[in-house]
Image (tube, rainbow, N blue to C red):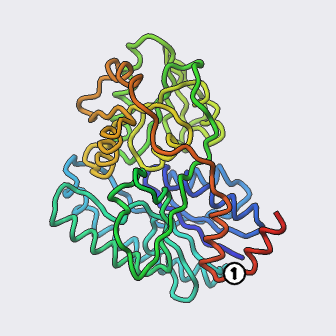
Amino acid sequence: MKIFFPVLNWGLGHASRSLPLIRTYLAHGHEVVCASDGEALTMLRKELPDQMVLQLPGYDILYESRFMPVNMLKHAPGMLKTIKTEHELTKAIVAHHHIDCIISDNRYGCYHSGIPSALITHQLQVFTGQRLMDMYIRRQIRSWYKKFNEIWIPDHGAHGNITGDLTGIDTAPVPKYYLGVISELTSLPSVGKYKAVAVISGPEPQRSNFEQLVTSQLSSLEGQFAIVRGKPDAAEDIDRAGNLTIFPYLTRAALSLILSQTQIVIARSGYTTLMDLAKTGHKAILCPTPGQYEQIYLADRLANLGQCVYTRQENLNLRNAMQEVEKVKTIGYVSELEKDLFIERLYSLTGHQEKEQAYKVAI
């Protein structure tokens, strides 16, 4: 089977969570044509050096304002244009590469009326802080996901999951399925070389603002710390400054190795980061991207469950947070990667149940 797998470039989270599915399908003998833009494109090409990774137009979202409605209104025309463009490109890619199905990670224009398609998303509802805008955006999202045959949610369906209200709505007539927590990280928390590891991610300019703030505060604390900048386009050199070891970028395997040398992670509350932490069991200090209400909702929800230390960027005090984090529990569920479920969903989507049984016998 030949799969087209486009991935949203909004930080590195969508590419990170898509990699386990892509690798599973490759391991089962399928062909996968990936696509993205920007840093996610670079990451996919580094992680999948032998695979075809095409370039799609970028959404080019910048969080210039801390007031989310301003950002949404400013970028809405460009987003709609990009969705239309990527849909036309998808039709050309399907025809040229003889694609059998599409699995799209949050790229709403990457569907095709002639072949089955699934949308991977954890954002069935969007929070902006403005009720009327929320209603409008949710209606728009519904019009987009109705173009797909299925919705795949990277989370557990049980009460107390990570996404909460973000995914807890009825999507009929489009069925939704939960894939479980998706993360390739294999590390376990331990008392190791680093007192904490800071993982920097997200769109500019807030990504750089967060990096500067974390670097400044950690450099004044006792102990050794690591900072992972999440910049796959940056030079490969590791920088050491005082008590800080700064990595420009780490593959998923290398990040697992670094995280095995600490018990504490400092990060944004981006959804893929939360899945990683749920998988590894590290304690978390979460600082949402200013103006990104989804991250604020998730961090606040987990803090109320006693599963993280939550602080807004303008109030970030890592000296205090490092003391508070000792008292919290870990995030959500710790579970194995459900690779069999990835295959089952693929064959259910494409109507290849008989092939599914053949693969189960083979493995």
Q: Is residue 205 visible?
A: no
Q: Residue 19 sits in which quadrant?
A: bottom right
Question: Height in image: 310 above or below 125?
Answer: above
Q: Nearer the viewer, residue 285 or 324?
A: 324
Decide if residue 305 is on the left or right side of residue 147.
left
Q: How many marks?
A: 1
Q: Residue furthest right?
A: 362
Residue 11 image point, x, y percent: 45, 50
Question: Height in image: 346 above or below 74?
Answer: below
* Amino acid type, label 1: His
Q: Please name the residue shown 63% across and 48% down the image.
A: 336
Decide if residue 223 is on the left or right side of residue 75.
right
Q: Nearer the viewer, residue 265 or 16?
A: 265
Decide if residue 113 is on the left or right side of residue 294.
right
Q: Describe the element under mark 1 as helix, strand or loop.
A: loop
Q: Is residue 33 visible?
A: yes
Question: Height in image: 87 above or below 223?
Answer: below
Residue that carries the numbered disc 1 in the rendered image: 352
Quadrant holding the C terminus: bottom right
Residue 74 image point, x, y percent: 23, 61
Quadrant holding the N terminus: bottom right
Q: Please name the residue shown 39% across and 24% down the image.
A: 327
Residue 347 image point, x, y percent: 66, 75
Mark 1 crowd level (few <14, some 14–19, many ≥20, 10 Å Cα): few
